[in-house]
Amino acid sequence: MRRRRLFFYLPGLGFALLAGLAQAAMGLAEIPGTAGDGPVTVFYPASGEALPVQRGPFLLTVAAGGTPVPGNGRLIVVSHGSGGAPWVHADLARSLVDAGFVVAMPEHKADNYKDSSNPGPGSWAVRPAEVSRAIDAVARDVRLAPLLALDKVGMYGISAGGHTALSLAGGRWSQAAFARHCEANLEGDFQACVGLITRLTGSWIDGLRKWGALLVIRHRFTDDAPREHNDARIAAVVAGVPFAADFDMASLASPRVPLGLVTAQQDRWLIPRYHSDRVLAACLPRCEWIADLPTGGHGALLSPPPPGLTGLIGDMLNDPPAFDRAALLPQVNARTAAFFKAHLPPRLPVTPGP
C-alpha cells in the first residue's frame, strides 16, 4: 500500500467561513442526555465574549453559556476514547465551530474520565446507540435545535471512539472476534488486548501476564453475534487511530457513508498493522485517507493533550520526540473540518413565517 504522508493543502487562509461566523465565539454548554445517559457537552457558534474557563487541568477560551448563533445548520457528534473527556477535543471543536458546525460530545457510560469501570468490548457494544441518543438530546434542546437540520449529521471518534465511528460507518464486529484476535496476536498487540492494566517487560513474569490476560479474555468475550448499528441521520464519519482488529473487514470494504481515516504510525497502543492499516487495506479507494502522521503516537489527535502523564499511560499517549504537534495538529483539524464540509452541505432549517 502506498502511504499518504501528511500532505496538506490549505487554500488561502484555510476555510471560507460563512460570513456570519467571522466574529462568532465558540460557545460551551452542557445539556442533559436521554434515557439515563450522562451529560452531552456542546461547542457551538455563539455570541458573547470568549473568556478563559478552567475544566480540570485544561484552560479553554470559550463563551460559556453564550447565546447560539446560526452556523451552517449541521451537527458533528464526537466519541471520546476510553476514559476520555470532552476537553481533549477542544481544538478540533474550535476548527469545526469556526467552519459553522455545532459539536456534541456524549459521555460514554462507564468508560469516561469520571468512571472507567467498563472499557473495551462492553463499552463498544453500547457506544453507537449513545451517539444516536446524543443527537436526540440536541434535537430536544430549545436553543440549539432551531438552528440545526439533523437529517445529515457527522460523526468523529478516536481510539475506542474510532471503533464507534467504524460501527456507524457500517462495520460489523463481535466480542468473539476480539478474543480470537488477542489469542492470535497477544504479544504483538498486548496493550490493545489488555488496556493499561499491565504491560510486557521482557521478564519471566510476562508468561503469567499473558496467561492471565487470555484467561480473562476467553472467559468474558465468547459472544460471536455480529454487532452493528445504523442511524440514517449519520451521513459522514471520521475515524482516528481506531481499534479495528475485531471488525469483519468485508463490512468496511464499501462504507455505507463517506468514511475518512486519520492514522499515526508511531501508535504503540493500537499498532497500525493490526488496526488502521487493515481498515485502509479494506476500504481504499472507497474511503478517504485524511491524514497520516508518520511521527505521531496514539495521543497525537488529543488536542489539547492531557498534561503530566507518567507511567504506562504516559508511554502510550505522550508525543514521540520527533512529533511536531504545533505545526501538524491544526492542519489535521482543518482537513477533518474540510472533509465534513464536503459531505455535509450547509442547510439552515426553514422557520415558519409570521
Image (tube, rainbow, N blue to C red):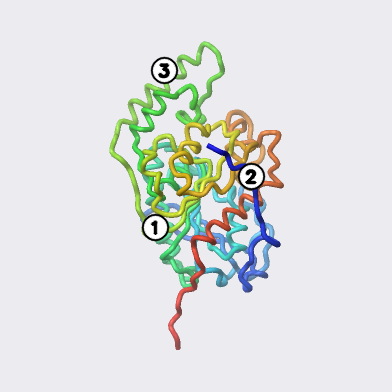
Disc 3 and disc 2: Cα gap in Å? 40 Å
Q: Which residue is mark 3?
A: 211
Q: Earlier in the sequence, mark 2 or mark 1?
A: 2
* Mark in front: 1 vs 3: 3
Q: Which residue is mark 2?
A: 6
* Mark in front: 2 vs 1: 2
Q: Dividing the picture into quarters, in which one does residue 223 lie?
A: top left
Q: Is residue 113 visible?
A: no
Q: Nearer the viewer, residue 169 or 68?
A: 169
Residue type of the residue flagged with mark 1: Thr
For this view, does 8 lie left or right of residue 154?
right
Q: Is residue 131 visible?
A: yes
Q: How many marks?
A: 3
| Residue 104 image point, x, y percent | 50, 57
Q: Secondary structure at mark 3?
A: helix
Residue type of the residue flagged with mark 2: Leu
Toward the bottom, the furthest residue is: 354
Q: Residue at x 58, y 50 (%)?
A: 89
For this view, does 176 lie left or right of residue 99?
left
Q: Which residue is mark 1?
A: 34
- Do callouts 1 and 3 mark residues in contact (Cβ within 8 Å)? no
Checking the image for residue 224, the label placed there is none
Residue type of the residue flagged with mark 3: Trp
> Crowding near pointer 3: few (<14 within 10 Å), some, many (20+)?
few
| Residue 81 image point, x, y percent | 51, 43
Q: Secondary structure at mark 1?
A: loop
| Residue 52 image point, x, y percent | 69, 58
Q: Nearer the viewer, residue 66 or 74?
A: 74
Disc 2 and disc 1: Cα gap in Å? 39 Å
Image height of 235 relative to 352, above or below: above
